[in-house]
Structures are given as C-alpha cells and as structure tokens.
Image (cartoon, rainbow, N blue to C red):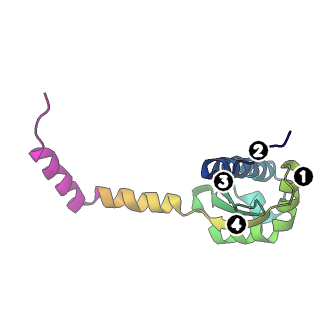
Amino acid sequence: MARQQDNSQEGRSVRLLRVGEQVRHVLSDVLMRGDVHDDVLAAHSVSVTEVRMSPDLRHATVFVKPLLGADEAAVLKALRTNTAYLQRSVASRVNLKYAARLKFLADESFDEGGRIDALLRSPEIARDLDDGEATAPDEG
C-alpha cells in the first residue's frame, strides 16, 4: 500500500517543529554535559532557545543565549568554531536522511521583550492606559 504524502501546510510545519525540537534537545544535552571541549563553552551555561529547520531539513538555525547574556559574542564564536562536532552529534542522534547544517545566532527575543516591557512601563503609556480605564464603562 502506498504511503500518503501530507503536503498540507499543517503537516509540514508540524514535522519541522518536531525535528527542530529534537535537534534542540540534542544540542542542549551536548552543551549541558560539556561534551564540547572548549574553554569558553565550559565557562558559560548556554541555553538553546529555539531551532528553526528549513523545509528540506538540511539547514537548522539555532538560537542561543548564554546565561545572563554574558560574553555573547565569545560564546557564539566558540559555537561556530565547534559546529562540525555539534553537527556530528546531531546527525548521530536525530534520524534524518541528511545531516542538518547548523547556523548559530544570538536569540534577541529576550531583549525585545525587555524593550516592550520598558515601553509599556513608560510614563506616557501608563498615563494613556490610566485614561482608558477611567473612561471605560462599568460592567455590572
């Protein structure tokens, strides 16, 4: 019996998310255990926050954040230096037809969240929010 291909947008995205999570878990495990013999990576705790897979599963964009954002540039450089080892680790643990090529980027989502939080707490925005609550009709 022929296997049906799920070519819908939902089917592809679920698979990409699932494989991305598998790659994220493997990379987190390798970095947590200290399998990479690098002084910079040994000195820093690195969080792998997200992995985005390309539609053909050949490329993975890995978003990382060192603990407290310390020495982010040095950590990214160390990860990029050890990319070959990390790719081999992922290829041996995640069963894919091709070994995904890893690209490491700094995760800016925490910084963006902090910027938005600071904007919402600014006096101008707080004043506008207070005015909006004062003019809202009471529900009862």
Q: Which residue is situated farthest in the front direction here?
A: 1
| In front of the other: 27 or 42 | 27
Label 2 and label 4: CA atoms lie apart by 34 Å
The disc placed on residue 47 is 3
User: 75 or 82, which lies in front?
Assistant: 82
Instruction: Farthest residue to the top: give it.
Output: 140
Query: Could you say where residue 105 lies in the image, as x and y percent from the top left?
Result: 65, 67
Circle 1 packing at 10 Å, graded few (<14), some (14-19), many (20+), is few
- Tell me the quadrant of the picture where the N terminus can be found: top right
Badge 3: few (under 14), some or many (20 or more) residues near its Cα, within 10 Å?
Answer: some
> Are the residues at dot 1 and dot 4 in contact (C-beta closer than 8 Å)?
no
Along the polypeptide, which appears first: circle 1 or circle 4? 1
Q: Nearer the viewer, mark 2 or mark 1?
A: 2
Q: Which element carries disc 4, helix, strand or loop?
A: strand
Q: Position of residue 109 (x, y in %)?
A: 52, 59
Pointer 4 residue: 104
Instruction: Kindly identify the amino acid type of the residue bearing the numbered disc 2.
Output: Gln
Q: Is residue 46 above or below residue 80?
A: above
Q: Quadrant of the C terminus?
A: top left
Give the magenta range: 121-140
Q: Position of residue 15 (x, y in %)?
A: 70, 48
Task: Give the mark toward the camera: 2 or 3.
Answer: 2
Taking the magenta stretch, the answer to whether it contains residue 130 is: yes
